[in-house]
Amino acid sequence: MNKIKIPILISRINRLQKKHLNDSLKPFNLESSQGIILLKIKELKKITPTQLVDLGLIEKPAISKTLKKLEGLGYIFKSPSDSDARSFSVSLTDSGKQIGKHVEKFIDELDKHFQSILDKNNAKELTKILNFLENKEIKK
């Protein structure tokens, strides 16, 4: 009998979640990562590119291109920083707010499905695993 490998299982969950979110965002010409960024901007109202990178939502090399696309589609707008002329923050347009709500609804529905499958102990164990992966450096 094959033992279930937790890292592979987590990877499969992530891949399937992205696939379903990508399908949901196709009418808006967006991918899952862009939708998640819009959701986070919706939650925080205003955020800098550096903060998006620091939150682990996007890699530093991709931030400029992603924000440029979201701005070109009319989902975000840039505001110059008061303290640093080289910096800016981004906020959502009305269209971006609608996408943020769409992504939030998708995540909430997915959460309801997960909650119906997992009992409290399973959810705690999953949280422990994810906290370990976020906070520990895996030794080689």
Image (tube, rainbow, N blue to C red):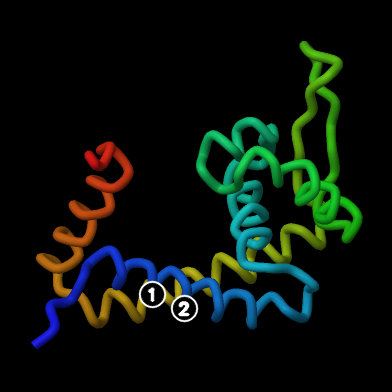
| Amino acid type, residue under disc 2 in the picture | Leu
Q: Secondary structure at mark 2?
A: helix
Left or right: residue 121 versus residue 102 is left
Q: Which residue is mark 2?
A: 16
Q: Is residue 83 above or below residue 107?
A: above
Residue 79: x and y, percent? 84, 32
Query: In the rendered image, which quarter is residue 30 located in?
Result: bottom right
Q: Using the image as rendered, state which of residue 108 and residue 137 is in the foreground.
A: 137
Q: CA distance from mark 1 to mark 2?
A: 6 Å
Residue at the far front: name it: 140
Q: Which residue is mark 1?
A: 12
Position of the C terminus by quadrant: top left
The reply to whether the C-beta atoms of the residues labelled 1 and 2 are less than 8 Å apart is yes
| Amino acid type, residue under disc 1 in the picture | Arg
Position of the N terminus by quadrant: bottom left
Residue 44: x and y, percent? 60, 41
Q: Is residue 102 above or below residue 77?
A: below
| Residue at horizontal 58 percent and vertical 75 percent from the top | 21
| Residue at horizontal 14 percent and vertical 68 percent from the top | 122
Query: In the rendered image, which quarter is residue 29 located in?
Result: bottom right
Residue 55: x and y, percent? 51, 39
